[in-house]
Image: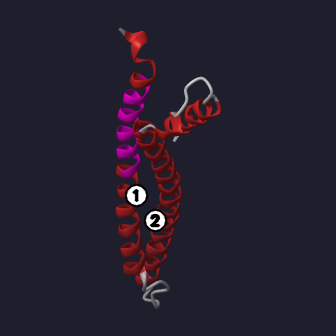
Amino acid sequence: MGCPLLALGYALALLDDEAKHPCVGHSVSFIIFAASFVVSFAAGVLLVINRLEDVRKTSNIVKFRDQNDEACALNEPIPHPDLDDSRAETRLLARFTWIFFYVQLAGIAIGGGAFVCFIWSLHGSKFR
């Protein structure tokens, strides 16, 4: 999440200094760069929240499974018969984790490429 946040800070600094470079905010590469990093940052936040929920549910599954095993060993009724539902939820959370990860990765890649194009269009004469 650090890379998109730093890039967005740079984008805001460029927009603030628009007197030096007019029409910075209207550049296609700038818009792609800023939008990609916003999407990447949002996906990173959702990734962390989703992963925390997944870890919490997984720890509950382990705890409840152990309680069920103890109850079976003592021939008592199973206290948590709905573990399969919880396992299905964690499989779904795992899928969302990977989706958010790939969205974040794609946002960084697309935004990084657009950032390089934007910097080249802005300061290309200095690189020659």
Q: Secondary structure at mark 2?
A: helix
Does residue 62 appear to the left or right of 113 in the view shown?
right
For this rendering, which residue is in front, 27 or 91? 27
Is residue 106 part of the magenta span, yes or no? yes
Q: Which residues are magenta?
A: 103-119
Where residue 33 appears, as percent x and y from the top left, is 44, 39
Where residue 2 appears, as percent x and y from the top left, is 53, 37
Q: Quadrant of the C terminus?
A: top left
As drawn, 75 above or below 114? below
Q: Are marks 2 and 1 in contact (CB under 8 Å)?
A: no
Taken as a whole, is the magenta stretch helix, strand or loop?
helix
Residue tagged by mark 2?
58
Pointer 2 or 1: first along the chain: 2
As drawn, 124 above or below 95? above
Task: Name the residue located 46 percent from the left edge and 65 percent from the top edge.
Answer: 58
Task: Name the residue located 39 percent from the left edge and 62 percent from the top edge.
Answer: 96
Q: Which mark is residue 17?
A: none
Task: Name the residue located 35 percent from the left edge and 68 percent from the top edge.
Answer: 91
